[in-house]
């Protein structure tokens, strides 16, 4: 018996030690929630919420960051963030990371900045570095539908809207966040955590169940910057309004009260339903009504009756550069789950149109992964005195070299048997000669010095004075080196809520260097680089000789004054009349006005000058102008879109109105990263868009390491398209 006790004692101790070690390890390890519902999208920004042990970050000098690879396989460190204490027990931090490849990994690092008060430049020390396991990211071309609520019909609708090759939108339904963890302002504009989302659905019942305000504020910023939201709130609207102050701005008017829905004919007609709603189901429905119903903001697509004073059921309206579609019934209830018309109703509300995208991703693969963003990238990747060496010339030099080292060298050896020293000298001379030919040929096609080539869009919303800039830059280096890069608005009169972000700009698709490639592209300069104190600064970027790197930047802010004074209104025929007066300090060239399906030539709009539409030419067809239609015999033929065209203005014009031009049916290309700049949806929402060429709105500031700051880069050109969104006066 004593022997058994002595034998079991060490065994029990051996079994107990691992459990104790595991418990203490779990308390000290860094864990993370990555993406939306553990789904990430390559080539886009994704949220990362770190959960950290107290011992690692309790010191006020400890900060955290995340590192991920860009498409070239180089590690990029995010701006530093200070964790916050949640529920007096857990330390957490929410950061953003842009994934450069589907097979990349993420590292979480804890950095001690030392005592910043004792030294002018504190010494950073990496305390902890942990590799985070992330789920396989979806492709960069995969469209995502964000669902906040319990709407089982959403997935069925995406299946109905699937393309011919079977590809369809992916529905992501993250759980409501009970704890509010905000993204640090150092990570750029608000709303960036939803960068990979194409459309969003929010149910009123989900808001009252505990969606945190921080998530709703991020969604609000995402919509204003060009997002597309479907907001369903009928009987649930009062509780949703009391749960968050953001909801009131999403409504087309001021909420008054709820009333019973006695007739559902308008809803059934709008849904094109084959079967009406059950009578008992209609008796349980209640819809909101608003104060001053005739002054509803937006376009009423369905209402209870035909009179102007009847309560609206579906309203679609512009919200900054995005749009909000509101429906006054809760489609996530049992009443609509069993109704056959719910699917077609959702299709109309989401406005999913696949006529231009019938080939889907299969067509994109056939095109080598090129999209409009990739075509713009190729156009920006063009510099003064830099061109591709023709393949014919490379083949000719290679052929001559092969002929020289064998037939010519053999012939010289046979002819110089008496002078063998010539044989030993001939081969080195040939190698040196062809080396000189190769070097001089390279210098002929590759210019000296460093260059920067930029292009972009500058958008202004007249109603809210909100402005956004989307800019792209290419950096060319003639020699090996490192450089810093930062962005800022070119205008000094932007209000204080300015937030900007700069990042790499990758090629599209699965080609080498694309975010969907099977493995990262091997970099010519494989050293890591990092962000500065803010997301608008990149530091110590490596670049190889005779190569280029491309970057994209965004910033958002507000203007102190209205840029345009407008009296434009709509006539009974749907055309425009009125005047425009520029209050800008710079002229806009080659201006046009776009509204509904019409385009009006304005010409150059000088500061302080007024343009009267009655004095100009009549309207033209918008689609015909965008596709450059011309009469050929007895029919109109559109000019074929050239995927090898490098005209930046042309690319930005068509990408900015891609759906109005016919979408991929006309261009044969998807929008890619340029999808957010498409303003076609605003043309039918009581908005007018003034477009013209203007000065740069984004200031790119590159600085080569080990060089004086006053030694700038050669400017290889800038192209900026200005777009001002105006309201139609009643």
Image: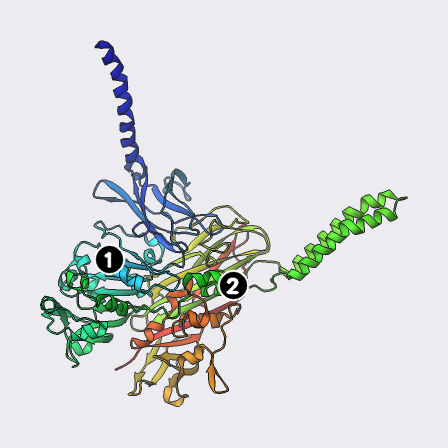
Instruction: Please report the residue visible at 48 percent of the width from the left and 58 percent of the height from the top.
Output: 507
Q: Secondary structure at mark 1?
A: strand
Please state the horizontal and vertical placement of residue 709, each as a whole percent of the image: 52, 55
- Alpha carbon distance from label 1 to label 2: 38 Å
In the displayed structure image, the side of residue 723 where residue 718 appears, left or right: right
Q: How many marks?
A: 2
Give yes or no for contact between labels 1 and 2 (Cβ–Cβ under 8 Å). Answer: no
Residue of label 1 = 148
Q: Secondary structure at mark 2?
A: helix
- Rendered image quadrant of residue 298: bottom left
Q: Is residue 540 above or below residue 567?
A: above
Please state the horizontal and vertical placement of residue 535, each as a whole percent of the image: 39, 54
Foreground: 50 or 642? 642
Residue of label 2 = 378
Foreground: 398 or 527? 398
Q: Nearer the viewer, mark 1 or mark 2?
A: 1
Say which label, 1 or 2, has the lower sequence index: 1
Please state the horizontal and vertical placement of residue 473, each as a whole percent of the image: 48, 61
Q: Is residue 567 above or below residue 397?
A: below
Please state the horizontal and vertical placement of residue 562, each as a whole percent of the image: 33, 74
In this orientation, does residue 343 appear? Answer: yes
- Rendered image quadrant of residue 466: bottom left
Q: In which quadrant will I find the N terminus?
A: top left
- Rendered image quadrant of residue 613: bottom left
Residue farthest to the top? Answer: 2
């Amino acid at each position: 018996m004593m022997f058994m006790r002595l034998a079991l004692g060490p065994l029990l101790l051996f079994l107990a030690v691992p459990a104790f070690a595991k418990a203490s390890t779990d308390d000290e390890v860094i864990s993370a929630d990555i993406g939306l519902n553990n789904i990430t999208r390559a080539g886009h920004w994704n949220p990362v919420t770190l959960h950290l042990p107290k011992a690692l970050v309790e010191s006020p000098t400890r900060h955290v960051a995340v590192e991920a690879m860009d498409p070239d396989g180089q590690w990029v460190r995010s701006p530093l963030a200070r964790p916050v204490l949640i529920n007096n027990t857990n330390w957490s931090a929410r950061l953003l990371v842009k994934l450069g490849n589907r097979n990349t990994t993420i590292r979480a690092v804890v950095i001690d900045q030392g005592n910043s008060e004792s030294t002018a430049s504190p010494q950073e020390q990496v305390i902890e570095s942990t590799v985070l396991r992330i789920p396989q990211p979806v492709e960069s071309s995969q469209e995502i539908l964000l669902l906040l609520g319990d709407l089982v019909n959403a997935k069925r609708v995406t299946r109905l809207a699937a393309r011919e090759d079977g590809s369809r939108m992916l529905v992501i339904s993250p759980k409501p966040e009970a704890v509010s963890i905000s993204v640090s302002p150092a990570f750029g504009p608000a709303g960036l955590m939803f960068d990979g989302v194409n459309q969003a659905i929010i149910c009123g019942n989900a808001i009252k169940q505990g969606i945190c305000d921080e998530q709703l504020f991020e969604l609000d910023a995402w919509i204003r910057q060009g997002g597309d939201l479907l907001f369903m709130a009928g009987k649930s609207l009062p509780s949703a309004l009391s749960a968050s102050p953001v909801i009131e701005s999403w409504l087309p008017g001021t909420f008054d009260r709820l009333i019973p829905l006695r007739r559902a004919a308008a809803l059934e007609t709008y849904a094109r339903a084959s079967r009406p709603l059950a009578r008992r189901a209609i008796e349980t429905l209640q819809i909101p009504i608003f104060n001053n119903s005739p002054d509803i903001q937006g376009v009423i697509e369905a209402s209870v009756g035909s009179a102007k004073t009847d309560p609206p059921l579906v309203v679609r309206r512009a919200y900054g550069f995005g749009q909000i579609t509101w429906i006054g019934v809760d489609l996530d209830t049992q009443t609509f789950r069993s109704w056959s018309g719910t699917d077609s109703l959702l299709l109309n509300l989401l406005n999913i149109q696949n006529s231009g995208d019938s080939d889907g991703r299969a067509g994109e693969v056939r095109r080598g992964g090129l999209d409009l963003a990739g075509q713009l990238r190729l156009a920006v990747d063009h510099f003064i005195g830099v061109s591709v060496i023709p393949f014919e010339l490379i083949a000719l030099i290679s052929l001559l070299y092969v002929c020289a080292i064998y037939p010519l060298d053999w012939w010289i050896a046979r002819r110089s048997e008496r002078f063998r020293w010539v044989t030993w000298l001939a081969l080195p001379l040939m190698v040196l000669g062809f080396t000189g030919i190769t070097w001089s040929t390279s210098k002929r096609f590759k210019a000296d010095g460093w260059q920067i080539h930029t292009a972009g869009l500058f958008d202004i919303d007249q109603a809210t004075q909100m402005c956004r800039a989307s800019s792209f830059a290419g950096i060319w280096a003639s020699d090996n080196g490192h450089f810093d890069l930062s962005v800022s608005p070119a205008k000094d009169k932007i209000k204080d809520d300015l937030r900007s972000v700069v990042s790499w700009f990758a090629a599209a698709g699965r080609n080498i260097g694309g975010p969907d490639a099977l493995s990262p592209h091997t970099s010519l300069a494989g050293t890591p680089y990092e962000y500065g104190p803010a997301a608008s600064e990149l530091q110590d970027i490596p670049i190889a000789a005779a190569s280029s790197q491309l970057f994209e930047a965004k910033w958002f802010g507000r203007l102190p004054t209205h840029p345009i004074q407008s009296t434009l209104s709509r006539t009974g025929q749907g055309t425009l009349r009125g005047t425009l007066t520029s209050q800008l300090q710079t002229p806009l060239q080659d201006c046009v006005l776009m509204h509904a399906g019409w385009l009006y030539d304005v010409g150059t709009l000088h500061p302080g000058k007024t343009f009267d539409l009655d004095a100009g030419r009549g309207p033209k067809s918008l689609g015909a102008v965008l596709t450059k239609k011309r009469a050929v015999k007895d029919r109109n033929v559109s000019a074929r879109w050239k995927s090898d065209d490098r005209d930046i203005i042309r690319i930005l014009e068509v990408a900015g109105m891609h759906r109005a031009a016919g979408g991929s049916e006309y261009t044969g290309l998807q929008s890619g990263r340029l999808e957010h700049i498409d303003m076609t949806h605003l043309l039918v929402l009581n908005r007018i868009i003034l477009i013209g060429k203007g000065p740069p709105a984004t200031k790119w500031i590159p600085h080569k390491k080990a060089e004086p700051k006053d030694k700038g880069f050669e400017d290889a050109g800038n192209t900026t398209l200005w777009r001002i969104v105006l309201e139609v006066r009643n």
